[in-house]
Image: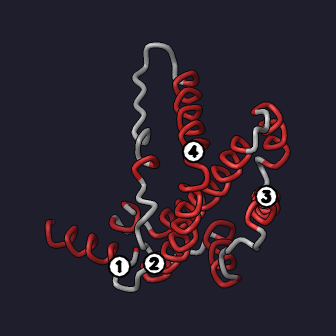
Amino acid sequence: MQALVDGYYRDAVSSFAASLERIFEFYMKVVSLAAGLDGLVYDQTWKLVAKQSERQLGTYLALYQLENKVVSPVLSPKHVSFRNRVIHEGYFPTVDEAVDFGQAVVDLIQPLLNTMMPRYTHAIEAQSLLHAASAKIKTANGAHHVVFFDNFILKFDIEADDWNPKTPSFSKSFRSAASRSTTAR
């Protein structure tokens, strides 16, 4: 969001794309943990796909269909093509293109989180703690370590109607933040 406000639209698109890939990875970790899969088996499997985003997507789609008996929503071909132009071809998007892409990503992430919370609450809690512990271990001795997200997911409102048309969209929120930012200067 800050990259958008600051006018770094290419960085914003890249961050949104990475966020989507990471939420898919998070889903796979949580579902695997909930199913009782040994963490070492998950890690070994992840290493096989970690550097190839198409394989990661395929792994996510297969797991999602097994768990939910439906095909997962994904980015539209238009948004995939746009992402590839920005990431691989160096295209510099306009603010409207970046906001549109961000909205498409939010429209995928929010419903996924909404469906995960009631079904995988304990696995989400466990995965969050595992992630924090892993980050702490990887932090150099003596360095400060801050876990800023520890309770964020746990406070997620699973009863909220996030898709009510009266609810402000990401793009409206961005435009509001951007206008406040420019008037504050």
List the residue tagged with mark 2: 163
Q: Disc 3 marks which amino acid?
A: Leu
- Using a 10 Å C-alpha cutoff, classify the residue at mark 1 as few (fewer than 14 neighbours), some (14 to 19) or many (20 or more): few
- Foreground: 85 or 53? 53
- Using a 10 Å C-alpha cutoff, classify the residue at mark 3 as few (fewer than 14 neighbours), some (14 to 19) or many (20 or more): some
Q: Alpha carbon of mark 3 to alpha carbon of mark 1: how far?
A: 31 Å
Of labels 3 and 1, earlier in sequence is 3
Q: Alpha carbon of mark 1 to alpha carbon of mark 4: how far?
A: 26 Å
Question: In the visual, does 104 lie left or right of 28?
Answer: left
Of labels 3 and 4, earlier in sequence is 3
Residue drawn at point x = 60 percent, y = 61 percent: 20
Q: Alpha carbon of mark 4 to alpha carbon of mark 2: how far?
A: 22 Å
Of labels 2 and 3, earlier in sequence is 3
- Using a 10 Å C-alpha cutoff, classify the residue at mark 4 as few (fewer than 14 neighbours), some (14 to 19) or many (20 or more): many
Q: Disc 4 marks which amino acid?
A: Ile
Q: Alpha carbon of mark 2 to alpha carbon of mark 3: how far?
A: 25 Å
Is mark 2 in CB contact (under 8 Å) with mark 1?
A: yes
List the residue tagged with mark 4: 124
Of labels 4 and 2, earlier in sequence is 4
Is mark 3 in CB contact (under 8 Å) with mark 4?
A: no
Q: Give the image location of residue 82, x and y in percent.
A: 63, 78
List the residue tagged with mark 1: 167
Residue drawn at point x = 69 percent, y = 44 percent: 34
- Foreground: 122 or 62? 122
Is mark 1 in CB contact (under 8 Å) with mark 4?
A: no
The quadrant the C terminus occupies is bottom left
Residue drawn at point x = 53 percent, y = 60 percent: 15
List the residue tagged with mark 3: 63
Q: Does residue 156 sit above or below 4 in this rendering? A: above
Q: Alpha carbon of mark 2 to alpha carbon of mark 1: how far?
A: 7 Å
